[in-house]
Image (spheres, rainbow, N blue to C red):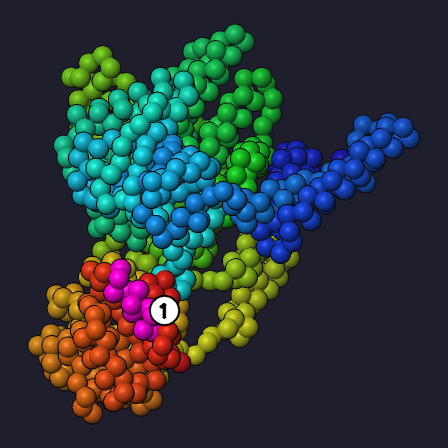
Amino acid sequence: MPDVKNINDLRQSLPFSSAPYPAVRLLVVVIFGIVSGTSIPMPLEGWMLGSALSFSLLLGTLLFENIKSKGPYPGFLSALSYSLFVLFCFAAYSSSRLNYLPSNGLLPFSGKTVLLYGCVDGRPDLSLKGGSWFMDVEEVFDNGRQVKLHDRAKVILRSTALRGFELHYGDMVRVKGKLDLIPEAANRGEYNPREAGRRKQVAVQLFCAGPWLVQHEGESKLNAFDHYIVLPVYNYMIKSIEKHFPDGEERKLAAGVLFGEKENMSDEVFESFKLTGTAHILAVSGLNVGLLALAIHICLQRLKVTMTGRLVALVLFIVMLLVYSAVTGNSSSVRRAATMSLLLVGGETFGRKTYPLNSLAFADFLILLIDPLDLFNPGFLMTNAAVLAILLIYPRLVSRQRKGSGFLKSSGYILLSSFMVTLSAIIGVSPIIAFYFGTFSLISFLANIPVVLFSNLLMYDLVPMLLLDLVSVYAASFFAASSFFFAGLTLKSAFFFSTLPFASINIRPDAIQVYCYYVLVGSVLFFSYRKAWGKLAVSTLLGVNILFWYSFILSSHPAAPGILTVNLGKNLAALISSGSETVLIDAGRASRDRKRIEGQLDEYGITAPKAVIQFYSPDSLIATLPAFHHMQHDSTKLSLSSMVIVRPEDKVLKLWSRKRTLLMVSGTGRLKETELYKADIAFLWIYRFGEKQQLQIQSWLNYAHPKRCILIPGSFLSRTDLTTMQHFVTLHPGIEIRNKTRQVVVE
């Protein structure tokens, strides 16, 4: 026996074994299968053939081992064939869900105004600004023709007249609107709706003008559990919050913490949570489920005296968690946390030892079994990274508290533990946040302490409020007042930290950098558990050097373009760079568009604008942008060291730089055949495209001969004029129509 002084030293001296973690081993194979199926360009038939061959090999090896050697464990070949079978099965499963759509689907109806009939799938996202939901479509009506099919569509409802409009999961509805393909990302590096739709097996979306075009028809397809338990519980909880909370951000925060409903929150409040890295409290996740599980566990503690009582407590625990998971929408993070809680409580009930890491892996396996493409969901990755970091890093940062500690030491230990849990989660989840969203909060480890504390207290007050509201509104009002107080503290804490300078920075690592980071963290953890301090120091230095040299030498840094457009919905911004200076023309209509422009500056490696020029954006927005010069609506000229900008008349801009000239004109009536209206690159806004406008453009083109001309259709341009414009463009090389999902890039 090793020479050790205590049990901890003995534990450290034992070699690591993967025997207690079968779910971890299985999950690794599943992940390799999903990644292979989505990244390797192999037809589905190839993956199916691999599954069949590996299954045949598995049966053969099991039969051989059963005849020749009847050992307690499977042999190497049977374990290998089993792993290959699982890998090929998940590769085929993920490939089919990502790359294949129904043959009789909705794609042929794209571009048409149709009437869809089907079932609402999932909880609709409804707010005062509009709503959206997914729909399992069974019928489509097009020009008096009824077609039976089976496909999925996303419905987008753009209307502010939603008061009194109700829509629930399982409702059978008819919806009329324009059907189109789900668009791609508006700008490089931004959220890609089409990729997200592919992961949900949705290729088209229907734009509905208002709730008057949505009609309930037919009986709901909710099952008995959802219809008689989940929906009444959800409606009761919503009405209880509306009854005890006055209308305002506190009520919206309570709904966000309890249900994950953040659609009604104002942009300013949501942005403050994002900047401080505390937006996770607005999504129902493991934290919410863990708090609820702890509360249920404490309330049912008296039942756990006998085996029968423990079984009854387990059944009640399962039912309550299932109801809450269904009420909150059954997101992957909720399913993972609920499954982990059930495994831990179930193991305790039957006296079986459970390993949190193995429980986490098993919960992930069940989620990926339902939908393998959840592996690429940022929420799935972030919750797993946070939980893994807490399980593995937190024990290395804080040792167990000794018994008999005084009040001050216990309070200090609780505060230190809260800080270290937050720090561990940030270490685990920050690279994924930076990879997907391009930001990193510098103060999140500080902001999370008060925000998470107050939101937890808010959650603990909301639960008794909802329970007491069943029997006594007066008694529930005390907990409602306390909930309102903690909701206010949560909001004030988020606002305070979001106003600090450098609350967050823009940074977007690539996949290789994220992989190197996690390999470095894993190696540091492994050697620290083994107490191999020399190897830990070597691995840390090696990992830091690899990240450093890759970031500054191997990672590509393309040259910044001379002209770049930034799509901002209906609006457009343009960045013009001379190499030494950058000018920004327009900045959208809302303050949130500024973040998108800053993201494109980082994405393309363009320096910060030295001047901001007004074209369509209001002067009040232009004045708030950080720059040395602001050319507002009444300014007619701006001279820089490498560029000159003039405004000959309203809605006309001309720019000279060292390499090219640029012209922006709103309306064909402002085009003139003078030297000032000649340019290499021209942007022309079109509001009508009749014969008169075509002649004006044709005459100007014959005079100016621009190398590239971009026509930007106005918001109210008719479909007939747009079709005519498309035909006009085909007859004139060098002219193109602006695409809301494609940027104009001029080197």
360 left or right of 171? Answer: right
Element under disc 1: loop
Disc 1 residue type? Gln
- In this rendering, does residue 533 appear at all? no
Q: Main secondary structure of the magenta part?
A: helix
Which residue is at 30% across, 57% downward? 503
Q: Is residue 579 above or below residue 63?
A: below
Q: Residues within 10 Å of mark 1 (few under 14, many from 20)?
A: some
Question: Which residue position is annotated with label 1?
Answer: 743
* Magenta range: 719-729
Classify residue 212 by image quadrant.
Answer: top left
In the image as oriented, which residue stretches furthest toward the bottom?
675
Residue 383 relative to residue 449: left or right: right
The single residue placed furthest to the left in the displayed view is 634
Number of dots carrying numbers:
1
Residue depicted at 17% across the width and 35% down the height: 163
Q: Is residue 557 above or below residue 532?
A: below
Outermost residue, right side: 68
The structure residue drawn at horizontal position 65% and vertical position 41%, both measured from the top left corner, is: 89
Q: Position of residue 153 (x, y in %)?
A: 40, 42
Residue 183 in the image: x percent, y percent?
38, 55
Rendered location of residue 3, percent (x, y): 72, 39
Looking at the picture, how far across and down is residue 438, in whole percent?
39, 59
Q: Quadrant of the N terminus?
A: top right
Residue 244 visible in the current orientation? yes
Front residue of this view, candidates 675 and 588? 675
544 within the magenta span: no
- The residue positioned 45% from the left and 52% from the top of the image is 195
